[in-house]
Image: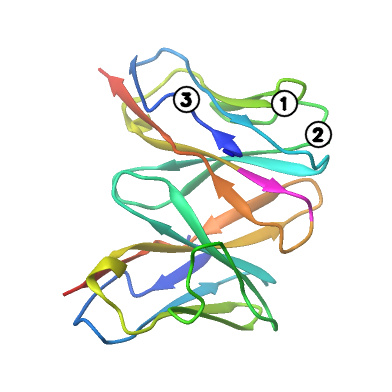
Amino acid sequence: GAVVSQHPSWVICKSGTSVKIECRSLDFQATTMFWYRQFPKQSLMLMATSNEGSKATYEQGVEKDKFLINHASLTLSTLTVTSAHPEDSSFYICSARRQGRTNEKLFFGSGTQLSVL
Amino acid sequence: AQKITQTQPGMFVQEKEAVTLDCTYDTSDPSYGLFWYKQPSSGEMIFLIYQGSYDQQNATEGRYSLNFQKARKSANLVISASQLGDSAMYFCAMREGYSSASKIIFGSGTRLSIRP
């Protein structure tokens, strides 16, 4: 079963509204979660690294005030797209890293398709 | 500069044949990790395989193996006995460093199509 839950799966909103996307690690504690954005037929672009209990680290070109990230607990990170505009329409996907003794995996949520009208 | 390079935008392979998907990377950090993911048309990201920079042996997971050539900085994915269900986008990714906050970046992907 899924180990990272992302909600909602899709959202349609009017321009100017804010949208919150939740990402939960279900059976492990994730000190670090990552938020990616993916345009159709393109790769995943890292937006920010979300660290539990501290401020997120944003990639160059990603507006901090536009994409608010909160990682309030070891199992929950949220991405809020503030005052969304049509150009923010995209597939947003979160991930959480689980590090083992000999292996590590990056588990992904199922993604959120955002359409801004 | 590109940190992760996948030079094959698309590939067609006959069912049951083996296929190699190329991935090269660039880092000066001695501690890093390499991942391969599969993304079918549904959009979900499916973990396939992981290779740590200090791992002595090539990683294997069922039909997937990673041909890790450290000196060449390549981490090609080999899929043996391909199946129709293998048709999907495949992404190579790298984590530089080993702190909990080390970011993970993705290559541009390869679209693999399996012919019956």
Q: Which mark is residue A24?
A: none
Q: Are marks 1 and 2 on the same chain?
A: yes
Q: Earlier in the sequence, mark 2 or mark 3?
A: 3
Q: Earlier in the sequence, mark 1 or mark 3?
A: 3
Look at mark 1 in the image and give the residue it sits on.
B58
What residue appears at the point 29 percent right and 45 percent down from the top-left corner?
B41
Q: Amino acid at mark 2?
A: Asp
State the extent of the magenta-drawn residues as a range: B94-98
The Cα–Cα distance between marks 2 and 3, rounded to whole angstroms, is 25 Å
User: Quick one: SS at disc 3?
Assistant: loop
Left or right: residue B72 compared with residue B22 = right
What residue appears at the point 81 percent right and 43 percent down from the top-left corner?
B31
Which of the two residues, A41 or A74, is positioned nearer the viewer here? A41
The correct choice, above or below, for B102 with respect to A72 in the image is above
Look at mark 2 in the image and give the residue it sits on.
B55
Tell me whether the residue at label 1 lies in contact with that at label 2, contact meaning CB atoms closer than 8 angstroms. yes
Q: Which mark is residue B7?
A: 3
Left or right: residue A19 compared with residue A54 = left
Q: Amino acid at mark 3?
A: Thr
Tell me whether the residue at label 2 lies in contact with that at label 3, contact meaning CB atoms closer than 8 angstroms. no
Q: Amino acid at mark 1?
A: Asn
The Cα–Cα distance between marks 1 and 3, rounded to whole angstroms, is 21 Å
